[in-house]
Amino acid sequence: MGVARSRARVCDGSLGALACLASAWEPQSMKGGQAMSPRHREAAGVLASWVVGHLLGWAMLCALVAGLPVVKSVSSVNVVPLIIGVPFGLAQWLVLRRFTGLSPLWVLALPIGWLLCSAMLAAIPQSSWQIVDDESPVTLTVIYMVMGAVVALPQWVLLRRRFARAGTWLLGSSAGLGLGFGLVLATGLIQQSELGAYTVVVLVYGLATGSILSWLLPHEARRPIDPTGSSGSLRKAAG
């Protein structure tokens, strides 16, 4: 009954189909047929919602590129981060607002992070790239790990107001982006299917950052919610 009520409450929320898809992924039992504890069930629900949200964000981006072919030809370092970041930022925030009252500014955090990353890469002298083997999968994986940490900086600024251990978010983003690209580079998938390769990157990134998020939520700090944040019920730490 408790699970049924929980599912009904989620499906009645503003996320609708996203929440229902995520709840379908949520494991209902553990090894030996024993029911999952509420804490593990919540963590599984957070992770599933986050991964589904990223896949929907990726689908929105693909639909945008397919519907507006001119988007593919955009090369401006100021526009590309918006094209990439806004769909994912919106999908992430729609998931986050179910679990914590983060500000809608989160939608812009990812594009800003990509702008910072672009500025960082542009600031590196061309002569420095000749020192390293920038075609080696190991080198590229390390570069993407650094990029993942930089991209997550604006998100960390927002998270640290709510979570005492928000610094782990930088590690999750770094590992997700680095390992995602490292996997498709090492397997050669990037050369076989560009769409499949980027889908794997999105999935790995979603799993890595979603795992961090599901770990962070029980450690939410008791701080006032930003007045520009979600209007939903406030989440309070137990005890």
Image (cartoon, rainbow, N blue to C red):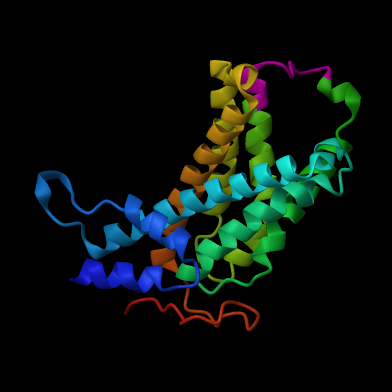
Q: Taking 37 as reference, is 173 left or right?
A: right
Q: Quadrant of residue 86?
A: bottom right
Q: Taking 38 as reference, is 185 left or right?
A: right
In the figure, 123 relative to 91: above or below? Answer: above
**Residue 45 placement (x, y as % from top left):** 36, 58
Task: Pick the residue in front: 51 or 160.
Answer: 51
Residue 230 sits inside the magenta stretch: no
Q: Quadrant of the C terminus?
A: bottom left
Q: How many marks?
A: 0
Q: Residue at x 66, y 22 (%)?
A: 139
Q: Is residue 116 visible?
A: no
In the figure, 196 relative to 150: above or below? Answer: above
Q: Taking 175 as reference, is 207 left or right?
A: left
Q: Quadrant of residue 228?
A: bottom right
Residue extent of the magenta highlight:
130-140
In the figure, 77 relative to 229: above or below? Answer: above
**Residue 9 placement (x, y as % from top left):** 35, 74
Q: Residue at x 50, y 72 (%)?
A: 14
Q: Quadrant of the N terminus?
A: bottom left
Task: Pick the residue in front: 188 or 156.
Answer: 188
Q: Main secondary structure of the magenta part?
A: loop
In the figure, 73 relative to 182: above or below? Answer: below
**Residue 21 placement (x, y as % from top left):** 40, 55
Task: Pick the residue in front: 211 or 5.
Answer: 5
Q: Is residue 88 visible?
A: yes
Q: Residue at x 33, y 53 (%)?
A: 24
Residue 134 sits inside the magenta stretch: yes
**Residue 7 placement (x, y as % from top left):** 31, 67
